[in-house]
Image (cartoon, rainbow, N blue to C red):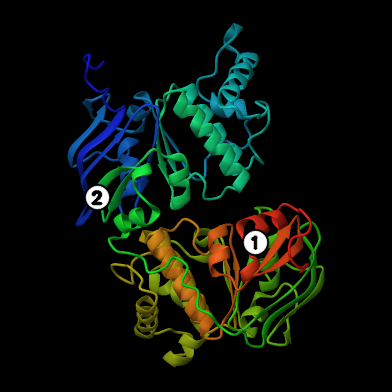
Amino acid sequence: MSAPGRPTPPTLALVNVSKSFGAVRALQGVTLELHAGEVHALAGENGAGKSTVVKTFAGVHRPDAGEVRVDGEPVAFNGPADAQAAGVAVIYQEPTLFPDLSVAENIFVGRQPRAGLGRIDRRTVHAETAKLFERLGVALDPQQPARGLSIADQQVVEIAKAISRDARVLIMDEPTAALTGQEVARLFSVTRTLREQGCAILFISHRLEEIFEICQRVTTLRDGTYIGTDRVEDITADDLVRRMVGRDLDALYPKQDVTPGEVALKVSRLTREGAFTDVSFQVRRGEIVALAGLVGAGRSEVARAIFGVDRWDAGDVEVAGRALPPGSPTAAMSAGLALVPEDRRQQGLVMDMSIERNMGLTQLRSLRKETARGPLISRKVERSRAADWALRLQLKYARLTDTVGVLSGGNQQKVVLAKWLATEPTVLIVDEPTRGIDVGTKAEVHRLLSELAAQDLAVLMISSDLPEVIGMADRVLVMHEGRLTAELARADATEESVMAAATGRAGTGKAA
């Protein structure tokens, strides 16, 4: 306890911490203080050291220099269990609950209260879980199985588990990346409740507007180095970007004005039972058309059907006037379609494969032809092509032979883009192109999409980021519950008009 007249020490802090992994300096002289009753943001580009900070707080890593302090006193966390015992809990972007256990069983797993003869006291487990949810201000059924819970509900369960263990520090690592607007609002309500109850909260997000909405202070890292800590009310979004990237961004949404050309993609009355119904639209060469809507509206399902990953039940798809058969990605690629999927790690990349090999996966036939060695592929040719794309997309890497898993999220996204752009497509479908990547890389991806459209490529962009939709799209198509509900010109697309159509409210733009 602090002496009278002295400020209360931070609940948890790093003091001048440095950490290296071989020759890579992940952190250098980082100081970060988390105080009770405060939401503190940690900002920085991918590779800035945020994950190393989280793992140091969580007891996964030990500092090479500097100190971790709890209530002002130096501590040595020898593992995650020590951090948990000190009241530290991490809420990850994608929680890992036991799917076959109930919500209450997940919260108290391994420490259930016992009744007579050593049996689990399920009544008490359910009652205590209900109290936790009441404290958080959310309505969840303690007896509901974890299987089938939304990401948002899983995060609430993880938060309830943390406070049931008397956690005093909550670290939220990109908690909103996969949430809808309503789910984000509920998470923020829970966060404010915890702050009012005296928790110290570390909040990590690439969405700057969230930092300014929910946080009181923000610490910025750049290349593993501490840049500074500011009160949120004392800085602007431009100030924060400048601290993160070390320069001014010319524009986050550098959309070039282009006169659309001929129709490149035509979708007519496309229907897939249980997913979407009667979807019709066109994308012209030079256009960026955004497909907007809430999570679950059917946007990704439409993209998967167009590309042939899923079969459609009715309707037609044409690429540059060429009709595609349903359920054939090979035919889609031959016609000039490319699909950058939402989940780059699971669907877009082979994580244990090298950067150069991932880039070459869509070019095996042409690589064989250029090699002229029958079924064999020249490593020299493959590496030359990969190096060319790495340069064009400003990829940050050590060696092209490194596995793609060592890259930051933004650079992994660039590898997926390179893989598909190498096929020289007519139509590029990009699903959540900037999810989980930092603001500097986000601007680079936007610049690339704008340049590709200016070079006559047709781009269909699926995004849940409304500023991205409004800033980058020539037209916005909005889906609600599997149907297109509006088509908005660039001049008419606002956050209000898009959300009105996405929630099914009538009178929003022209019917698609």
Q: Quadrant of residue 360?
A: bottom left
Q: Nearer the viewer, residue 357 or 435?
A: 435
**Closest to the observer: 208 or 296?**
208
Disc 1 element: strand
| Quarter of the image that includes the C terminus | bottom right
Q: Which mark is residue 467?
A: none
Give me the C-alpha separation between circle 2 and circle 1: 36 Å
Residue marked by disc 2: 227
How many numbered badges does the structure rendering display? 2
| Front residue of 310 and 283 | 283
Badge number at residue 292: 1
Q: Quadrant of the N terminus?
A: top left
* Residue 321 horizontal/vertical position (percent): 72, 88
Q: Which residue is depicted at the point 50% across and 80% down?
A: 452
Q: In this orientation, which residue lies closer to the viewer: 358 or 492? A: 492
Q: Residue furthest left?
A: 65
Q: Is residue 293 visible?
A: no
Mark positioned earlier in the residue sequence (2 or 1): 2
The amino acid at mark 2 is Ile
Residue 63 is situated, as x and y percent measured from the top left of the image, at 22, 40
Q: In x, y percent, where is residue 65? A: 16, 41
Check disc 1 and give the amino acid type: Ala
Report crowding for label 1: few under 14, some 14 to 19, many 20 or more residues within 10 A (C-alpha).
many
Q: Is residue 189 above or below residue 484?
A: above
467 lies left or right of 76? right
Q: Is residue 27 left or right of residue 159?
A: left
Residue 24 seen anywhere in this rendered image of the structure:
yes
Q: Could you say whether the residue bearing mark 2 is in a helix, strand or loop?
A: strand
